[in-house]
Image: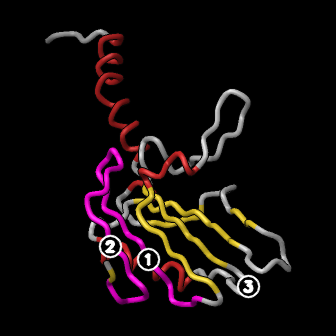
């Protein structure tokens, strides 16, 4: 019978089981393939002042595991806005939805530091949907994009409410 050195046994356990346990730690509810939408913190913009004729509200959202089909994407963002209404009285509303990417991870935050500037406008390649409307133009306009990983537009669809327009 062969004796196994405890150091060798420990090394074998480390080599095989530690990577497996680390892989298991990365599997959580957010990365399980479930589609999820949340507002990107610290990115809401209000342009104009109360009492001015036009006040613009811009909100930015992240979609984790977004659908590839543009009709499904429209249904997703439309349902999200219905379930999370945005007050639009006396406002022009512009909602932007971004996909998660290596350049725009789920925990991304704007950076205005001295040596670095990273704003959402630098991440247009990850913009996959937008909705606009106002109190005077109440019909919602949807712009939806299928983009390559590099951000090249492969397909675009535009809707006014449920009517496809070109």
Mark 3, residue position: 90
Q: Front-most of 21 and 148? A: 148
Q: Earlier in the sequence, mark 1 or mark 3?
A: 3
> How far apart are labels 1 and 3 at the CA level?
20 Å
Side (left or right) of 92 relative to 76: right
Residue 88 in picture, x, y percent from top left: 67, 83
Mark 2, residue position: 157
Task: Indicate whether residue 150 is drawn in magenta.
Answer: yes
- State yes or no: discs 1 and 2 in contact (Cβ < 8 Å): yes
Q: Front-most of 133 and 108? A: 133
Side (left or right) of 159 relative to 115: left
Residue 13 in picture, x, y percent from top left: 32, 24
In the displayed structure, 64 sits above or below 115; it is below
Element under label 2? strand
Residue 45 in picture, x, y percent from top left: 70, 62
- State yes or no: discs 2 and 3 in contact (Cβ < 8 Å): no
Placement of the N terminus among the 4 image quadrants:
top left
Q: Residues within 10 Å of mark 2 (few under 14, many from 20)?
A: some
In the displayed structure, 12 sits above or below 82; it is above
Task: Indicate whether residue 75 is drawn in magenta.
Answer: no
Mark 1, residue position: 142
Residue at image point 46% right, 81% down:
78
Q: Residues within 10 Å of mark 3 (few under 14, many from 20)?
A: some
Q: Quadrant of residue 94?
A: bottom right
> How far apart are labels 1 and 2 at the CA level?
8 Å
Residue at the far right in the pictured view: 51
Q: Earlier in the sequence, mark 2 or mark 3?
A: 3
In the displayed structure, 161 sits above or below 21; it is below
Q: Quadrant of residue 156?
A: bottom left
Q: Which residues are magenta?
A: 137-164
Residue 117 in picture, x, y percent from top left: 64, 37
**Main SS class of the magenta portion in the image:** strand
């Amino acid at each position: 019978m062969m004796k196994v050195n405890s150091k060798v046994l420990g090394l074998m356990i480390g080599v095989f089981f530690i990577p497996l346990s680390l892989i298991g730690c990365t599997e959580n509810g957010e990365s399980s393939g479930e589609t999820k939408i949340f507002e990107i913190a610290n990115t809401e913009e209000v342009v104009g002042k109360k009492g001015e004729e036009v006040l613009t509200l811009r909100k930015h959202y992240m979609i984790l595991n977004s659908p590839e089909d543009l009709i499904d994407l429209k249904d997703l963002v439309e349902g999200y806005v219905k379930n999370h209404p945005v007050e639009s009285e006396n406002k022009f509303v512009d909602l932007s939805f971004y996909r998660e990417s290596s350049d725009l991870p789920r925990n991304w935050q704007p950076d205005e530091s001295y040596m670095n500037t990273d704003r959402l406008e630098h991440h247009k390649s990850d913009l996959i949907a937008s909705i606009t409307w106002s109190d005077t133009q109440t019909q919602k306009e949807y712009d939806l994009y299928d983009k390559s990983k590099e951000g090249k537009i492969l397909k675009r669809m535009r809707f006014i409410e449920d009517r496809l327009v070109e």
